[in-house]
Image (cartoon, rainbow, N blue to C red):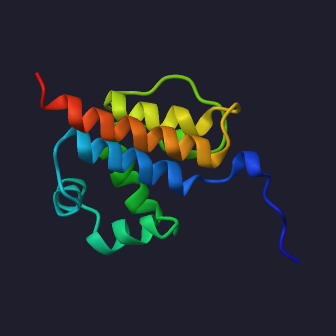
């Protein structure tokens, strides 16, 4: 019989993928660049977008590239962020907000990313 894991201790693949996408946008990179810089294969990055969990080595490389602790992607309240970009931090915070459901957090994240990309070039 499989044991049920508490939702509060599950790994949040969507939050990791959102943080990676936010950091990719912040650094003005494509996914091939993310793969090269992080040392994680493009196929692993594709699997993340499909909701599949990364292996331990890939998780370590990706969280190092982000400048975030892997604990940040456990569904537990966390404090502190390391050296991640503001956009990566916002994505992660939105998904942790108990006042937002998944769809609301995703909608806000997409709106912020889009606005950031538009305003970033208007220095």
Quadrant location of residue 120? top left
In the visual, does 43 lie left or right of 11? left
Quadrant location of the C terminus in the rendered image: top left
Residue at 35 percent across and 49 percent down: it is 20
Q: Position of residue 47 (x, y in %)?
A: 42, 72
Q: Where is residue 83 in the image (x, y as percent from the top left)?
A: 32, 28
Kindly tell me whether residue 3 is visible in this rendering.
yes
Q: Is residue 119 above or below residue 106?
A: above
Which is more toward the observer, 106 or 37? Answer: 106
Kindly tell me whether residue 71 is visible in this rendering.
no
Quadrant location of residue 66? top left
Q: Is residue 17 above or below residue 78?
A: below
Q: In this view, does 68 lie above or below 44?
A: above
Residue at 52 percent across and 69 percent down: it is 52
Q: Where is residue 42 in the image (x, y as percent from the top left)?
A: 27, 70
In the visual, does 51 lie left or right of 102? left
Q: How many marks?
A: 0
Q: Where is residue 104 in the image (x, y as percent from the top left)?
A: 60, 42
């Amino acid at each position: 019989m499989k044991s049920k894991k508490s939702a509060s201790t599950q790994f949040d693949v969507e939050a990791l993928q959102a943080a990676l996408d936010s950091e990719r946008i912040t650094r003005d990179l494509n996914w091939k660049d993310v793969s090269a810089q992080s040392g994680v294969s493009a196929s692993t990055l594709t699997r993340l977008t499909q909701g599949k969990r990364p292996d331990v080595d890939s998780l370590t490389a990706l969280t190092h590239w982000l400048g975030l602790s892997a604990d940040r992607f456990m569904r537990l309240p966390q404090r502190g962020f390391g050296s991640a970009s503001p956009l990566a931090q916002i994505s992660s915070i939105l998904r942790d907000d108990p006042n937002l459901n998944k769809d609301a957090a995703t909608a806000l994240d997409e709106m912020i990313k889009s606005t950031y990309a538009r305003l970033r070039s208007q220095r």
